[in-house]
Amino acid sequence: MPRSATEPALDLRPVLNWCISQAEPMLRTLRHSVEIESPSQSKTAVTRVAEFFARELKRTGGKVQTYRHARAGAAVAAEFWGAPRQPQPILLLGHTDTVWDVGTLSQMLFRVERGRAYGPGILDMKSGLIVGLFAIRALRALNIKPRSSVRFFLNADEETGSTAFRSALLREARRARACLVLEPAAEGGAVKTARKGVGVFTLAVRGRSAHAGINPAAGVNAISELAKQIARVESFARPAAGLTVNVGVAQGGSRSNVVPETASASIDVRVERARDGDWIEKKMRSLKPILRGARLEMTGGMNRPPLERRRTAALFECARGLASQLGFALHEASTGGGSDGSFVAALGVPTLDGLGGVGDGAHARHEHVLVRELPRRAALLAALLATI
């Protein structure tokens, strides 16, 4: 995947120096994007930040397309270097939505303290979008042309399952020869070479109500049935193999003197291997009632495949070599969180994740990025775009 032996080696010093020279513009652009709050559930808010990035990508020379949806905010695609030597593009992948409600900014003001920039969504993942934007600007400023075109896709609802623009995302993925995902780095700046697949199931139980004092035997206790089913579901976990099951929400009943007629539970499943996702789907859907007269309904399922390391190994080795040339050591990590990169890798496309900002506190009140790392991450991404 790196440049062939007949091509001259790329001197990365000008790339790094240019990115360092852009530290202040990077921070200003990052602040602007963070101060456009964009929770997934607000179509208006997500569209507003999508339009901001569409303008920035157009200013950078991209051929920009905006996708609209009846339910979700807008998604954006941009293409650079449209007359490539390689017919298949490199896909840069990110998302504009965050987990923070509109109004959070008044309690989590954008600020820079001791080399850390804070704000809602700054790590996950507006800093990654800024890294991608300035990596492209670096190559254009230095007249370095990648061997293939670059497609930059900004999804609008990644935090809630990537349903609105899933078909557009998969279209982009099927065209690509490699995918670089701008989700935040793991601890210490490590890139992510493996992610767990994610499933969300809902188990609904229907029993039969009755008076708890006068005739309890006439009822079928939905909460009792649910409790028994939860014990069964938890037995499906295989932590040593990376398969975890968590019952995160359970509810049911109406009052203490009524045999409860309904109950339900929300179940989170994580898997390291695709075949384990298939297995747990079958196990969940094979559940049968334990109490006579109870009925079960299982909905949901696996909604993100795992990112398996075999899809990332070659790109990681390339990135590690480029990082060394840039003067730092790059490590790899695995994570239990989901990413759109998993959809791409499941199609057989080489994918490397975690190339965005370096920091801590994703989805937490102390969410922040290390300001000094932004130019270095942009330089690494630019080097990858120019090399693979």
Image: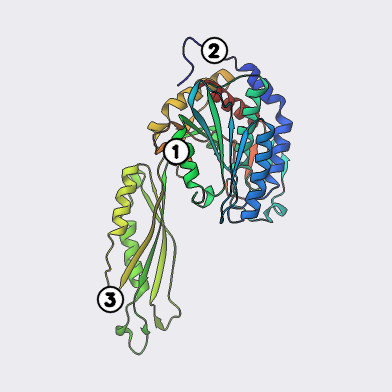
* Secondary structure of residue under mark 3: loop
Q: Residue 363 versus residue 77: which sits nearer the camera? A: 77
Q: Amino acid at mark 3?
A: Gly
Other residues around mark 3 within 10 Å, as few (<14) / some (14–19) / many (≥20): few
Farthest bottom residue in view = 214
Residue shown at the point (70%, 54%) measured from the top left? 107
* Secondary structure of residue under mark 1: helix
Instruction: Please name the residue that numbered disc 2 is placed on.
Output: 9
Position of residue 136 measured from the top left corner of the image (x, y, whole percent): 62, 28
Query: Left or right: 82 with respect to 192?
Result: right
Q: Residue 28 versus residue 236: which sits nearer the camera? A: 28
Asked if 370 appears above or below 233 in the picture, the reply is above
Other residues around mark 2 within 10 Å, as few (<14) / some (14–19) / many (≥20): few
Query: Left or right: 9 with respect to 371?
Result: left
Residue shown at the point (47%, 30%) measured from the top left? 178
Q: Amino acid at mark 2?
A: Ala
| Quadrant including the N terminus | top left
* Secondary structure of residue under mark 2: loop
Instruction: Please name the residue that numbered disc 1 is placed on.
Output: 344
Distance (Cα) linking label 1 and label 2: 29 Å
Other residues around mark 1 within 10 Å, as few (<14) / some (14–19) / many (≥20): many
Of the residues tagged 1 and 3, which is closer to the observer? 1
Distance (Cα) linking label 3 and label 2: 72 Å
Asked if 236 appears above or below 114 in the picture, the reply is below
Asked if 209 appears above or below 204 in the picture, the reply is below
Position of residue 246 measured from the top left corner of the image (x, y, whole percent): 41, 55
Q: Amino acid at mark 1?
A: Val
Residue shown at the point (58%, 52%) measured from the top left? 99
Instruction: Please name the residue that numbered disc 3 is placed on.
Output: 293
Quarter of the image where one finds residue 263:
bottom left
- Is the C-beta separation of discs 1 and 2 under 8 Å? no
